[in-house]
Amino acid sequence: MVITDVRVSPVEMQRVIGFASITLCGCFVLRAMRIVEGRKRRYLAMPRRYSKDGQAFEVFHPIGKAARDTLERVVFREYARRIRGEQGVPEMAVIGSECPDLRITSVNVRPFDEPKLRGFASVVLDDCIAITGIKIIEGRKRAFLQMPNARKKSGTFFDLAFPISSDIRDMIESMVLSEYRSNAEGAGLKHSAG
C-alpha cells in the first residue's frame, strides 16, 4: 500500500511538536497523529479513545516494527521540511506490500444486542495498519458504519480514520456488515443489518 499524501502541522504544546495526517493509496485518511519529542527519542503517537470503563485503545496503529518505522520516517521527514519552510510534494512511500490499491486483509466484528449500536468492528489494511472502534449502527432503513471519531473543543465531531473514496467506503461496509451478519447469527442475535 502506498502513502500518497502526508500533512504535518507543527505546534508547540509541551512535548507535542506537531500533528500529522496521511493518505493511503489516495483513498483512505488517517489523521490526528501526534509527533512527540520524548525523553529518549521522537515518536509518533496514534490517536486514542477510551471505553466506558476507562481503558484506552488506539483508534488505528501500525502492525509491526517495519510499518511503524515507515510511518515515522515519512512523517518526520515532512515535519523537517515544514520546519525548514520547504514546499513541494511530500515523500511517497510503500507500507506493507507494494500493491498500489488499498486491500482489506482482515475484518473482525463484535456484535452487540442494543437497539441502535449493533456492534463494533476492526479492519486491517494490507496486513500492516489496524483500524479499531468502527461502530455498526442500525439506521431507520438500513445498517451503516460510523468511522472512529473524536470531538473538537467546539463540540463537533470529526473522523479520525476514514475512506475518501465511495468505492472503498462501500467495500469496507460490505465486508463488515457481512461479517456482522455471520457473527450475529452465530451468537443467536437478531439483526436486520443489510
Image (cartoon, rainbow, N blue to C red):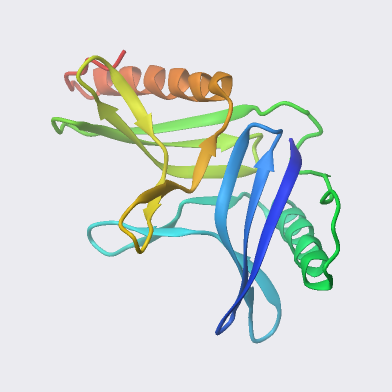
Q: Is residue 17 left or right of residue 98?
A: left
| Image-quadrant location for residue 96 | top right
What is the tally of numbered marks visible in this picture? 0
Which residue is at the far left? Answer: 115
Residue drawn at 39 percent across, 53 percent down: 150
Residue 85 locus on image (x, y percent): 82, 68
Question: Looking at this view, is 27 or 47 the one in front?
Answer: 27
Question: As rendered, which of 116 and 87 lies closer to the eye?
Answer: 87
The relative height of residue 117 versus residue 144 in the rendered view (above or below) is below
Compared to 2, does 184 lie above or below? above
Q: Is residue 56 above or below residue 134?
A: below
Q: Position of residue 78 (x, y in %)?
A: 78, 60
Q: Position of residue 172 (x, y in %)?
A: 50, 25
* Quarter of the rendering containing residue 9: bottom right
Q: Quadrant of the N terminus?
A: top right
Q: Residue at x 60, y 29 (%)?
A: 105
Quarter of the rendering occupied by the C terminus: top left
Pick the residue in front: 192 or 13: 13
Horizontal side, residue 186 vs residue 94: left or right = left
In the image, 164: left or right of 65?
left
- Residue located at (56% from left, 52% from top): 31
Q: Position of residue 185 (x, y in %)?
A: 25, 17
Quarter of image, res 33: bottom right
Left or right, 86 with respect to 184, comes to right
